[in-house]
Image (cartoon, rainbow, N blue to C red):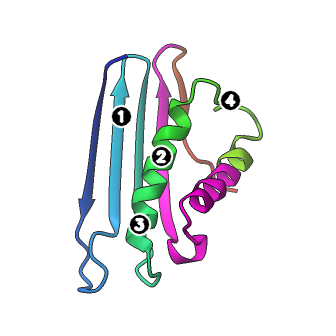
Amino acid sequence: MDCNHIHASCMGTAPDHLYQDYIMVEDSENYLIAAVADGLGSKISSQRGANLICQFIINFFKKEDSDRFAPSFSDNIIEEWYQFLSSKGVASSDCQTTSSFLFFDKVSFLLCTPSHK
């Protein structure tokens, strides 16, 4: 399957915390995924956290077996995020970030975005 994939990072203003913002977009025949993150500058690896969460979100939604629209979706993605960080040897407390995403399934015309409780 062909897909277009872009990513970018934006330079922060603090000299010791550069590139804390990150965006990734992947567009294929079957789906469109966009993820954006802003690393929390007070954390030692916030720029890495912003990059990793965007990678994680893109890969999470690309999985064929992902039950993206299940009621337990939000619990599953958070649990998998912590597992992903652990596999990278990164402490979640060191790479805190805010993030948001959009997933659009072009085949079934379903849209998934984060909900806030």
Quadrant of the rendered image containing residue 73:
top right
Q: Is the N terminus in the top left, top right, bottom left or bottom right quadrant? A: top left
Local SS, label 3: helix
Q: Nearer the viewer, mark 2 or mark 1?
A: 1
In this view, 103 is above or below 101: above
Q: Residue at x 49, y 67 (%)?
A: 97
Q: Is the C terminus in the top left, top right, bottom left or bottom right quadrant? A: bottom right
Q: Nearer the viewer, mark 4 or mark 2?
A: 4
Q: List the residue tagged with mark 3.
A: 48
**Mark 2 near mark 1, Cβ–Cβ under 8 Å?**
no
Q: List the residue tagged with mark 4.
A: 67
What's the distance in space between the residues labelled 4 and 2, CA to CA?
16 Å
Instruction: Count neighbours of disc 1 (C-alpha within 10 A) and say few if under 14, some if 14 to 19, many if 20 or more.
Output: some
Q: Amino acid at mark 1?
A: Glu
The percent coordinates of residue 3 (x first, y second) are: 32, 24
- Closer to the chain start, of discs 3 and 2, is 3
Q: Amino acid at mark 4?
A: Asp
Local SS, label 2: strand
Q: Residue at x 27, y 75 (%)?
A: 18
What's the distance in space between the residues labelled 2 and 1, CA to CA?
11 Å
Q: Amino acid at mark 3?
A: Arg
- Closer to the chain start, of discs 2 and 1, is 1
Instruction: Count neighbours of disc 4 (C-alpha within 10 A) and say few if under 14, some if 14 to 19, many if 20 or more.
Output: few
- Closer to the chain start, of discs 3 and 4, is 3
- Closer to the chain start, of discs 4 and 2, is 4
Local SS, label 4: loop
